[in-house]
Amino acid sequence: MSLNWDLTKCKDLDSIETDKEWVITEALIWLTMGTGIGDVSQKNAAEFYARIHLLEAIDGAWLGFRGEDGERVDRPITPKDVEKRIGMSTNVFPMETRNKWLNRIGKRVLDQSSNQYVLGVKAENDE
């Protein structure tokens, strides 16, 4: 299934589609899947940001730019980034409740961590 989006209800559509802002817009479009929130509204913007913030705490920043030395410089999503995109919608539905989302993310993190641990133990035993 494809990810479809609509930005036409965003207040300042021209600004979020500029070259500089599009990378942020695109990241937030994809983050609707990660957050389980497909429509960003005034009512749920704080929750959308909070879920992004938690995902970035776990996985690292979604955005990065090349610094002067060519190294990646992480650029976390900000509340202002989300605020500028209120009105954005995608075909990610229905909205996941906070508890369901936290269970899904918690399970993913625990599964990844336990798999890494088991693999590490096996590697030590193999030597």
Image (cartoon, rainbow, N blue to C red):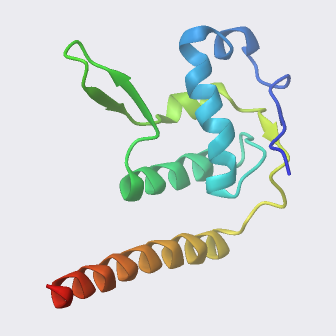
Q: Position of residue 53 (x, y in %)?
A: 45, 50
User: What residue sits 75% from the left and 19% below the top?
Assistant: 11
**Quarter occupied by residue 36:** bottom right
User: What residue sits 24% from the left and 25% below the top?
Assistant: 71
Q: Is residue 77 above or below residue 39?
A: above
Q: Is residue 112 left or right of residue 18?
A: left
User: What residue sits 73% from the left and 41% below the top?
Assistant: 40
User: What residue sits 59% from the left and 35% below the top?
Assistant: 27
Q: Position of residue 48 (x, y in %)?
A: 61, 49
Q: Is residue 64 left or right of residue 28?
A: left
Q: Position of residue 114 (x, y in %)?
A: 37, 83
Q: Is residue 98 left or right of residue 66?
A: right
Count of residue discs: 0
Of the pair 95 and 4, the residue shown nearer to us: 4
Q: Position of residue 55 (x, y in %)?
A: 47, 55
Q: Is residue 13 left or right of residue 121?
A: right
Quadrant of the drawing holding the C terminus: bottom left
Q: Is residue 93 above or below residue 98?
A: above
**Quarter occupied by residue 81:** top right
Of the pair 72 and 18, the residue shown nearer to us: 72
Of the pair 36 and 9, the residue shown nearer to us: 36
Q: Is residue 32 above or below residue 69?
A: below
Q: Residue furthest bottom?
A: 125
